[in-house]
Amino acid sequence: MPELKERKFVGKVDFIKGLEGAITHESTLSYVDGQNGKLIYRGYSIDDLCRGGGGYEETACLLLNGKLPNRRELDAFSADLAKRRAIPKEVKDLITLVAKGTHPMNTLRSAVSLLGCLDPKEFEVNVENDMRISLNLTARFATMVAAIARVRKGEPILDPDPSLGHSADFLRMMTGKKPDARTAEVMDMALIIHAEHGMNASTFSAMTVNSTLTDLYSSITAGVGALKGPLHGGANEQTLRTFLEIGDPAKVDSWFKASKEKKIKVPGFGHRVYKAYDPRARIFDPIAKEFAERTGHGHLYQIAKKLEALVVADLGGKGIFPNVDYFSGIIYNAMGIDTAIFTPIFAVPRIAGWCASILEYLPENRLFRPTSIYVGDLESEYVPIEKR
Ligand SMILES: CC(C)(COP(=O)(O)OP(=O)(O)OC[C@H]1O[C@@H](n2cnc3c(N)ncnc32)[C@H](O)[C@@H]1OP(=O)(O)O)[C@@H](O)C(=O)NCCC(=O)NCCS
């Protein structure tokens, strides 16, 4: 081992890996109260937005336009979104070509990229043009994810029905039948509680890319890529797979014991910000029970509750509680949706959060450019290749 030369960069800096605690900018979009387990969008709690009856459209309008719409504004926003839901033939062709052979998030990422290629104004970076793209994407994510789900099952892609609300039409385009009112209401809640969540990894990725003043489509493809990861949106798939793997409430204890021995992180638990119960998991818990029992999957809910009790007894002191991904899989599974589509369902509402974050930052844009601490050598002797 050659002796290390003295480093010239020895600035004394405190930092926590993973940018924990680092502040990017000021925002009025959402507040994640990790200590008290609350989530606020522009001043309004997600519980109120879920109960309010304005559906996903109300939340998307709130996030994108900055204020809660009145009845007339909401109707106009909903009608506009419905008109924008149709997707170009080229995107349907792409989905038809690739959706069967790859992860649905890969197809979604490629579809967003293709939408950018088809948009003659994609390179115009200003708030007005980015708002147009944002509304189109917010509307079309539902159609694209539904189309991906259909093609994966070998079924034809369905066009949107503008007479239906966003959640109901999303479910119809995915399953082929108009959902009952309760199922549409629960999908509305799912879309509301997933719409926005502060400076999470996918929002940060999308904003970082957008801070270079590239086109919005490029930024959103980065967001989709980040959301796919198992430490982020991908956890909801893992959670249901875990419940299915355990299979029987009687086997929860032995499964948890083995997972502790193997030092496996239990999917659906823990969060960088929430050190209390995730408010989104709290909303989903009773709905998971209702939907699991309604469709004969009550054992999955029992497994979830038993595992929750064990994990919280063991790790609750460290702030480890169920997160949003813990119960969502049970609900989507009861709706007859394939496990592989769970993460894309997360993307369907989060597109509004990504776009709203980007639109908010654009007028005050400054390139995101953090720094790392160089701990390598500074004066290594260059040896010609033939002498190494
Ligand atoms: C979400 C997550 C990535 C947060 O990561 P983080 O902020 O880096 O948290 P840490 O890894 O520092 O966790 C702190 C401690 O809790 C433990 N912990 C965190 N999540 C855990 C889990 N799901 N199961 C068991 N232990 C967990 C860690 O091992 C660590 O223990 P230590 O102090 O003994 O080292 C992490 O909790 C995780 O991987 N969860 C499972 C995946 C998931 O559900 N993701 C969706 C998030 S919405």
Image (cartoon, rainbow, N blue to C red):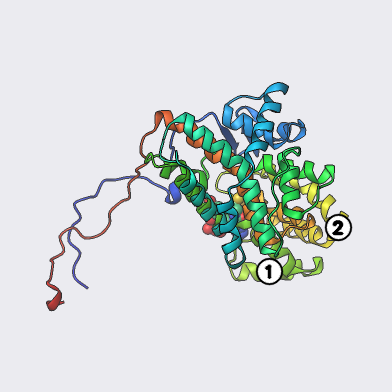
Left or right, 184 with respect to 377, comes to: right
Q: Mark on residue 295?
A: 2
Determine the residue positioned at 70% across, 64% down.
Answer: 153
Residue 328, percent across and down? 71, 52
Mark 1 to mark 2 CA distance (whole Å): 30 Å
Residue 128, percent across and down? 48, 29
Residue 29, percent across and down? 56, 31
Amino acid type, label 1: Lys
Left or right, 184 with respect to 74, comes to: right
Indicate the quadrant containing the C terminus: top left, top right, bottom left or bottom right. Answer: bottom left
Quick check: which quadrant has ligand 1?
bottom right
Amino acid type, label 2: Thr
Q: Mark on residue 257?
A: 1
Q: Is residue 219 above or below residue 74?
A: below
Determine the residue positioned at 51% across, 55% down.
Answer: 110
Q: Can the viewer see residue 263 in this picture?
A: yes
> Is the residue under label 2 in contact with that under label 1 (CB below 8 Å)?
no
Is the residue indicated by label 1 positioned so its CB lies within 8 Å of ligand 1? no
Disc 1 secondary structure class: helix
Closer-to-camera residue (158/226): 158
Residue 353, percent across and down? 57, 39
